[in-house]
Every structure is written in C-alpha cells, then in structure tokens.
Image (cartoon, rainbow, N blue to C red):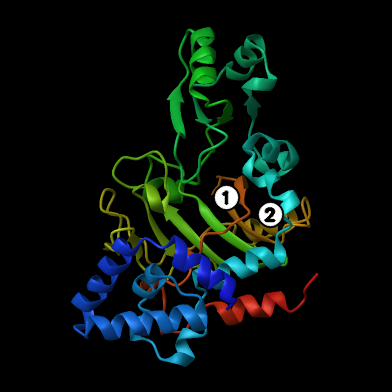
C-alpha cells in the first residue's frame, strides 16, 4: 500500500469515529483497546484497511492469510485508479449523458427536461400513471422519487425544473418474484464487472416503505452467486440486522434464484464496450418481467458490500477473484 495514500488517510481521518469504532470492536472481543488500535494500524499499513473495514469485515478475527484476501478501501481505490480513466468518468456521473450513451441497454423510455419543452414532456407523460424523477448530482438514492402523473403537467414540469429532478424515466417494470419480495421499490441487482468479467453481484432490497433500495438509505443487501444466480445467504442492513426473510412481506430471501441470470450478466458485459476506458464498474440493473433493464453505472464501485461476514462460508475474501480478472490487463 502506497505511503502517500496512508498519509492522506491519516490527515483526513475522523478520529472521533475511529475511536468509537475501536470501542465497538472491544465490545465484541473484549481485547485491550490499545492492542486493538495497533492491530488495526497494522491492517491499515499492510492492507489499506480503514477502521470501518476492520470492524465491518471483522478483520480483527482474521489471521494474515485471511486478511490479505480482503478488498479494503485502499485496495479498492487502487483498482479504480488502475482501470478507470479519469477523463471518462464524467460519463457515469452525469445521469443524462449516461442515459444517452447507454440507451439501448435501458429498455425503458426517459426524458431530460433541460433538453425538452413542456410539450415534449406532455407527450412523454401521455398514457403514464407514474414516473421516476431523479436529480443529476446526487447519489445513494437521494432525490429519487416515484410520483403519480397529475393532470396539471405544466405545473409538474416547473416543479421538477425548480427541484433539479430533471431526469424523468418510466417506472422500471419489476419481475414478479422480486415484486413479491418487496413491492414498494425496484429491488436492483448490483453487478460488478472488472475487465469485462463479472466478479461479484448483490441483490439490494428496499425496506421500511422506502421507494429506493439503497443500502445506505434504509435498504438491505444479500450476495448473489456469480455462477448460478442463487441467493445462499440472508440479507443484512446498515445496522447489521440480519434477515432470512423480508420483515414486511415475510418472503424468504435465502433460496431465491435470480431469473434470466445469464441475460443479466451479458447485459453488463456488453455495456462495458460503450466506454472501454472505464474497466471497473458497478452496474445497477432492474430485473424486468421479460428483460433486464440497466438503471445506471458507477465508476467508483463501493467496496462496503464485498466482504460482509454474513455472506461468507469462511473468512477469506474476494481479492483472488478480482486478481484473476485483472490478469488480462488492457
């Protein structure tokens, strides 16, 4: 791990949260706090582990052979720098530009209000009962709303322009299996590709009546077996609550097999060719009744889902799988 990265992390670290996290580790393993701190510092130096990695992935329970297989914050950053051209990442950060370039993979209608008139907007809304509205400059599901189409579409146009929710899309059709699991949000598939290979995948599930499924916005997540599309582990939320079944619908999570799994993977692998200069991408996909629909791509995949202990049979991590994909470097 580069010393420059470690130095930047030391300077920018939230020490209050860091010591709070060390105390949380102490509450679990009851070891000496000073010893815990120095053990984490060793993980930071050797493996680029942040204190959240150390706690969330339970690296304090691991030996060195196990720790060196974990995709930590530092390692994830290195992969992004190696495979993603900075001059091209704006394509993924500008949602309207993304929709234009990846339109053939979206499988739904959309309109960008800054490029459209009120008459264009009225035509787009004709026959629609609901639409999804999004801002261009927020992430983690913030500002995303599903709204009913009112009679006064002129007023709605003005409201959306004022709020900055200028990307308007059809409500993505959701496969009945995932709708039964949780009907209030689109429960998206997070498919991570590296060098045009699917290296890991997750199902994100909404909760608490929310219309978004984001892990950082009240949702939960479970791992998908990359080869089979099976869900073999329970879901977990940000507060580490574990769910064998959905708390609202009582539908079992473990044992679900994602339909059209090969089509989902092919969609993401094919989409990699649109911007080949960005080779490490986290795709969000809605599984429709007949076809998968691309929602968006993320040029800085969040590693916080990768190494959750509830989704493992042992303490070894995903890094060997990522390294295998990186062997055929561009």
Which residue is denoted by mark 1 in the rendering? 285
Dividing the picture into quadrants, the one containing residue 192 is bottom right
Residue 108 coordinates in the image, percent (x, y): 63, 35
Determine the residue positioned at 56% across, 18% down.
127
Q: Quadrant of residue 137?
A: top right
Helix, strand or loop status at disc 2: helix
Kindly identify the residue that appears in the image at 51 percent across and 30 percent down. 132
Q: Would residue 225 be seen by someone viewing this image from the given angle?
A: no
Whole-percent x, y for residue 283 in the image: 60, 54
Residue displayed at 51% across by 70% down: 7
Say the numbered circle drawn on residue 135: none
The answer to whether residue 301 is above or below residue 99 is below
Q: At x 54% / y 21%, what residue is drawn?
A: 128
Considering the image in quadrants, where does the C terminus appear? bottom right
- One can see residue 153 in this view: yes
Q: Which residue is mark 2?
A: 267
> Is residue 167 positioned above or below 140 on the image?
above
Towards the viewer: 151 or 145:
145
Task: Residue 54: give x, y in percent of width and height.
Answer: 38, 75
Residue 45 vertical position relative to residue 18 in the rendered view, above or below? below
Q: Is residue 109 left or right of residue 202?
A: right
Relative depth, front residue between 43 and 135:
43
Q: Quadrant of the N terminus?
A: bottom right
Label 1 close to label 2 by CB (< 8 Å) = yes
């Amino acid at each position: 791990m580069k010393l420059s990265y470690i130095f930047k992390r030391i300077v920018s670290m939230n020490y209050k949260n860091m010591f709070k996290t060390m105390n949380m580790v102490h509450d679990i393993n009851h070891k000496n706090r000073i010893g815990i701190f120095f053990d984490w510092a060793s993980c930071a130096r050797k493996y680029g582990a942040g204190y959240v990695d150390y706690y969330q992935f339970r690296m304090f329970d691991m030996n060195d052979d196990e720790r060196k297989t974990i995709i930590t914050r530092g390692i994830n950053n290195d992969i992004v720098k190696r495979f993603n051209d900075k001059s091209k990442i704006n394509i993924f950060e500008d949602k309207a530009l993304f929709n234009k370039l990846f339109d053939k993979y979206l499988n739904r209608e959309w309109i960008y209000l800054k490029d459209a008139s009120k008459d264009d907007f009225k035509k787009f809304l004709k026959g629609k009962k609901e639409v999804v509205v999004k801002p261009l400059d927020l992430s983690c599901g913030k500002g995303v709303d599903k709204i009913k189409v009112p009679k006064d579409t002129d007023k709605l146009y003005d409201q959306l322009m004022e709020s900055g929710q200028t990307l308007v899309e059809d409500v993505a059709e959701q496969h009945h299996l995932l709708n039964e699991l949780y009907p209030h949000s689109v429960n998206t598939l997070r498919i991570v590709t590296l060098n045009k290979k699917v290296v890991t995948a997750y199902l994100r599930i909404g909760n608490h009546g929310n219309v978004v499924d984001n892990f950082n916005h009240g949702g939960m997540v479970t791992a998908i077996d990359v080869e089979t599309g099976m869900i073999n582990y329970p879901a977990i939320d940000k507060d580490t609550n574990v769910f064998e079944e959905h708390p609202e619908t009582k539908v079992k999570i473990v044992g679900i097999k994602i339909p059209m799994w090969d089509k989902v993977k092919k969609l993401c692998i094919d989409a990699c060719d649109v911007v080949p200069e960005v080779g490490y991408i986290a795709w969000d996909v809605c599984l429709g009744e007949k076809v998968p629909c691309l929602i968006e791509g993320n040029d800085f995949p969040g590693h916080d889902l990768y190494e959750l202990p509830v989704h493992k049979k042992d303490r070894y991590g995903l890094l060997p799988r990522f390294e295998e994909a990186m062997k055929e470097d561009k």
